[in-house]
Every structure is written in C-alpha cells, then in structure tokens.
C-alpha cells in the first residue's frame, strides 16, 4: 500500500492550495482516508487530524479548520483531496495523508495504518 501526497507549496496569507493523495496497492474504497498536519516543533506522533472521509463520503473536519478546509475523495481515481482556502501563517505545517480500514475515524496517529510522505505547506507574506 502506498500513499503519495502532493500539492504543497508556499502561499501568502489568504491564499489557497489543494492537496492530493493518490492511493495504490490495495486501498479499498471502504477505507477511511485522512489528512494530518505536523506543525513546526511538533512531534510526529502528536500531529493533528485535519480532516477525514469515509468511503461513503461522510466527512470529519477539525473544528478549528471547518469552513476553510474541505476534504473530498474520488474513489474511481483512488485519490483524496484537501482544499484549503483563506490560509494563514498558523496553517504552516507538513501535511500527510493516511488511511485506515473503515468506518471509524480516530484522531491518534497510532490508529492509522498507512501513511504518505508528507507535503510542506508554508504560509507567509
């Protein structure tokens, strides 16, 4: 199982980015897909769940990011997306996608089975 994240970069405050995570090697449409982010200085094991989506399309978004971040998935392409708008410097982090068998969504890193390599998002003026 492989997860390949892409779409990170540097943007100014107020800008937007869309992250993509392509899954291959056996990720089923029943898997839950999620995005985590590791802020500067934060331990990997303690990184925060940003959003998650089940195979049926039901979603979870962290309250602090709700309204600005939107997760979606295209099961035919085995790809999950994270659309981020109105970014601010506090959103600067390494964003990683992850997967686990459904249907439950957990916020702890240790509860997720598969991980992508992470993509850097930097928000600064």
Image (cartoon, rainbow, N blue to C red):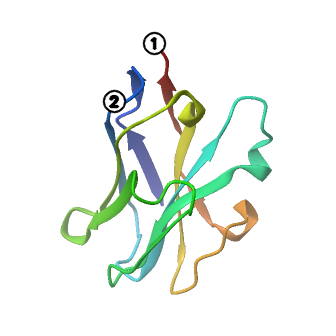
Residue closer to the observer: 72 or 55:
72
Q: Is residue 117 visible?
A: no
Q: Residue at x 48, y 24 (%)?
A: 123
SS assignment at label 1: loop
SS assignment at label 2: loop
Q: Is residue 15 left or right of residue 64?
A: left
Residue 36 % position (x, y): 58, 52
Closer to the N terminus: mark 2 or mark 1?
A: 2
Task: Find disc 2 in the rendering and name its residue.
Answer: 15
- The quarter holding residue 85 reads top left
Residue 11 % position (x, y): 38, 22
Q: Residue 87, relative to residue 59: is it above or below? A: above
Extreme residue toward the left, this view: 76
- The quarter holding residue 107 reads bottom right
Q: Assess disc 1: are there few (<14), some (14-19) or many (≥20) residues with their C-alpha within 10 Å of its C-alpha.
A: few
Task: Find disc 1 in the rendering and name its residue.
Answer: 125
Q: Is residue 52 visible?
A: yes
Residue 35 % position (x, y): 51, 55
Q: Residue at x 71, y 49 (%)?
A: 47
Q: Residue at x 40, y 53 (%)?
A: 69
Q: Assess disc 2: are there few (<14), some (14-19) or many (≥20) residues with their C-alpha within 10 Å of its C-alpha.
A: some
Q: Residue 35, relative to residue 87: is it above or below? A: below
């Amino acid at each position: 199982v492989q997860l390949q994240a892409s779409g990170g970069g540097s943007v100014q405050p107020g800008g937007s980015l869309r992250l993509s995570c392509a899954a291959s090697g056996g990720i089923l449409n029943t898997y839950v897909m999620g995005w985590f982010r590791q802020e500067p200085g934060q331990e990997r094991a303690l990184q925060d769940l940003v959003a998650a989506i089940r195979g049926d399309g039901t979603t979870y978004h962290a309250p602090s990011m709700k309204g600005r971040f939107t997760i979606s998935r295209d099961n035919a392409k085995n790809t999950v997306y994270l659309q981020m708008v109105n970014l601010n410097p506090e959103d600067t982090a390494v964003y990683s996608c992850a997967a686990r068998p459904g249907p439950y969504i957990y916020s702890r890193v240790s509860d997720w089975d598969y991980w992508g390599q992470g993509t850097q998002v930097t928000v600064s003026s």
